[in-house]
Amino acid sequence: MKAGDILGRAYLAALFCFVFAPIAASVVFSFNSDRFPTLPLGHFTTEWYARAFSRPELWQAIANSLMVAGCTAVLSTFIGFATAYTDFRYGFRFKQAYLALALLPPTMPLVILGLAMLAWLSNLGISGTLLGIIIAHTVLATPFAMAICRLRLSQMDPTLEVAAWNLGAGPWAAMRHVILPFCAPAILSALCLTAAVSFDEFIVAWFVSGLNRTVPVMILEILQGNVDPQINAIGTVVFLTSMSLVIAAQFLIFRRRSHD
Amino acid sequence: MTEGSRLYRLFWRLPLIVWQGAFFVVPVLFLAAMTFWLVKNYRMEPDFVLTNWEKVLGRGVFWDAYWLTLFRATLAGILASLIAFPAAYTLAFRSSESARRFALFCLIVPFFTSFLVRAYAWQVILAEGGPINAVLGGLGLGPFAMLNSGFGAMVGYLTLVLPLVVIFQTWSLSAIDRNLIEAAWNLGASPRRTLFRVILPAARTGIFVGAIFAFILTFGDFVNPFYLGGSKPPTLSILIIDTTKSGQQWPRAAVVSMMMILTLFATTAAALRAAYRGRG
């Protein structure tokens, strides 16, 4: 191995350490007895977990988060798939505008989206409800679902569907027997990924949630108080949840792709 | 075109238009309209006055925040691009296909995990009595005050944007035709000359797109300036939150939002033009 290669690897490793340091640190700190952790570390404890999870409002927040993430996943995956299919199947006037509408939301700063949502949903009388958070998260998550489904559709031979039509299948039957089975892994993957997006999002949720807090909004409100290692405990659980969802999503895409 | 297939077509086309129209386009337009509303006795009234624009743009606090935010976002875009490049280069040219895929997979994961908790972890790591100062203290240095400063905020920004920038750069570097690079070598170009005359121009689009994403994310972020940067002086996003949460001054927060949107549009358009210049 050449010196340049070793240098490159070392650099890469250092960069990964930097990116993953805060994630690793919060896991380590969550089992550490010190309120203000430093080196050397204190002793091992599960006290922060016990304290965090004995708060009834955390369980309420978890229930809210699961509810919001579940509904967001279903809604945004449906809209994302419909959009990806439309882009795959049809050409029409204003298609550029249509696609811009599909991909623009993630470029909007979340603080602005939060304020716009708060103002608009208050106007409609649904700010401060879980429904409001679900609506906002679906706006944010749909582009991700669309990207995943579009990627999968681009691997499909477009004449397959036409063949089904020629053999006498109606469009709905062709969708059901040809396209949906082909896209199944992408749809499952999109469900996982959009759930992860929703499960982590707190800025827009903070603006519109009112008293119905989700887990990350609760973390935000604890953070505005004092340093409290319970955050590490809650954060570790949130990390594990969303990482499992993201890993499941990627696994679903890659596994199928290696088959065909 | 039969009635059935028209229904079929609309069934797939309409959900996006309805949903993003009603809950993305309309709210943003509503916010724009709100900048002209009147606030009287702590109540908002639909109107068409320029008071909010005058009040916000006429204050030094706003412009201080504006230039600070613009400066930090530009700096983060440049720093992230420079720091990411050697890593992306190693991934694109010095790694096996499977190693590259695995590394990119790892880099996607943090994007979907709470950066609120990450910011908190940095708060603990960088604290005056935290692990880094403990190590430096062992070497007889410090303690350094790293939190509540531009430095603290930048650490947070880089954690947020580096994975994405590395991903974009790796994609565009991997797409370069290897024959081009070998041709440069065979023609006797030095490694440095190959880098500047062949590789960088060929990967320009991905490098620009990475930098733009870093700029956009940093420009709108409020977690890092708030928890690691000390929020004084405020950035634009902190200004929006303070203005929103302090009663009924939503129209003024909306003015700040519009200024942010306009700036993002202008910067992104300029950068994209530079990225695709001469490419057709």
Image (cartoon, coloured by chain):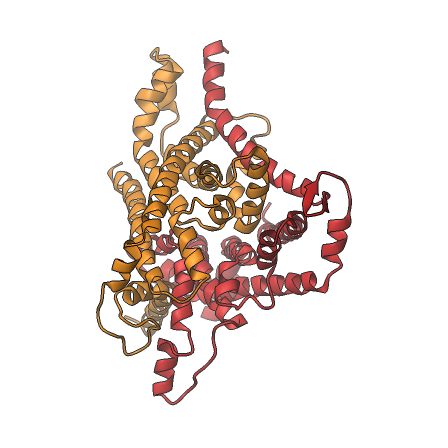
Chain colours: A orange, B red
Task: Tell me the residue at 45%/69% (across/down).
Answer: B191
Residue B57 coordinates in the image, percent (x, y): 73, 56
Q: Quadrant of the C terminus of chain A?
A: top left
Q: Nearer the viewer, residue B224 or B82?
A: B224
Count of picture labels: 0
Rendered view: A232 above or below A140: below
Residue A25 coordinates in the image, percent (x, y): 32, 66
In the figure, residue B243 lies in which quadrant?
Answer: bottom right
- Left or right of B83? Residue A256 is left
Q: Nearer the viewer, residue A73 or B33?
A: B33
Q: Quadrant of the N terminus of chain A?
A: bottom left
In the figure, residue B48 lies in which quadrant?
Answer: top right
Rendered view: A260 above or below B272: above
Q: Nearer the viewer, residue B12 or A203?
A: A203
Residue B234 coordinates in the image, percent (x, y): 60, 64
From where the camera sits, is residue A30 visible? yes
Residue A19 coordinates in the image, percent (x, y): 38, 63
From where the camera sits, is residue B163 visible? no
